[in-house]
Image (cartoon, rainbow, N blue to C red):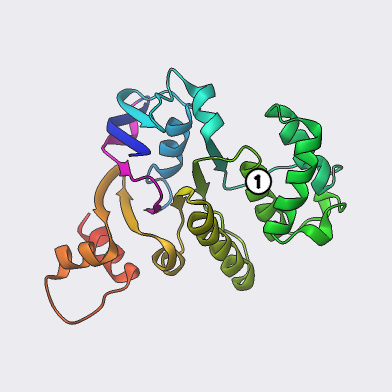
Amino acid sequence: MIIETTDLTKRYGHQTAVKDLCLKVEDGEIFGFLGPNGAGKTTTLLMLLGLTRPSAGAAAVCGLDPLRMAREVKRHVGYLPENVGFYGDMDAVQSLEYVADLNGIEVRAARKKIYELLELVGLQDHARKKTGAFSRGMKQRLGIAEVLMKDPKLLLLDEPTLGLDPEGAIQMIGLIEALNRSRRITVLLSSHNLSQVQRISHRVGIMIAGQLIAAGSVEDLARERFGLGDKVYTLEEVYLEYFQEA
């Protein structure tokens, strides 16, 4: 398992954001992490990165404890937050040079890799454009290039298509799928867009009020909720069934 948590819990005062989370993500899969706002998805991602301390329980990411080995975890994990931020007076190349320097990548190797990544994410024609003039979709793609600079084993993506127009969202989902297929990068994808998640995810997990109430393939979850039959259920139908019961 590339991610495994045992009874992972996060409390803020009297409020429990994540409760007794037992989550397993297999190496090489795309795992769709679903749930309404406030369900605990982002808090979970922050605990997996070692950016917030759990109140109880344990986690292993790439075989490492993010609580005690946060720096080592970050060497293997790329994180794209919901709102990607860049220095607006830097262009795309300068932004990636800055990231390369932070990760200790030698200048000559970094320059070659930067242009390869800009082509990969479709920004090769905007290499010298200031990021302050980038659209949200361009910033999201540059964010993907940024996290790929260190050749991660795992990507944690928090709402990567939020605010994108339909074409931009399709491009982003296609890019995530291609990275998983061609580079075998494991992806934990948090998203509200259920049709996009169903299109590329091998398995999904549903978080409600801080608890993981279901995890598995869409087919397995549909069978669990609706029984055997000839009808093919969408992820939206399965999600709503679990959500209404919770």
Main SS, magenta region, reads: strand
Q: Position of residue 10 (x, y in %)?
A: 36, 29
Nearest the camera: 232 or 177? 177
Q: Which residues are magenta?
A: 14-35
For the point 43% across and 31% down, the residue is: 47
Left or right: residue 106 compared with residue 43: right
Residue 162 picture location, percent across and down = 57, 58
Judging depth in this view, the residue of 115 and 238 nearest the camera is 115
Residue type, mark 1 in image: Val
Rendered residue at 28%/35% (across/down): 19
Instruction: Evaluate whether residue 227 shows in this view.
Output: yes
Q: Is residue 123 left or right of residue 210?
A: right
Residue 215 lies, in percent from the top left, at 26, 52
Q: Which quadrant does the N terminus fall into?
A: top left
- Residue under label 1: 84
Left or right of 110: which side holds 160? left
Relative to residue 106, is residue 22 drawn left or right?
left
Tell me which residue sits at (51%, 48%) in the image: 158
Magenta segment includes 30: yes
Q: Residues within 10 Å of mark 1 (few under 14, many from 20)?
A: some
Identify the image quadrant of the C terminus.
Answer: bottom left
Give the residue furthest to the bottom: 230
Task: Please say if 98 is above or below 41.
Answer: above
Residue 87 visible to an observer of this rendering: no
Of all residues, the one furthest to the top in this rendering is 68
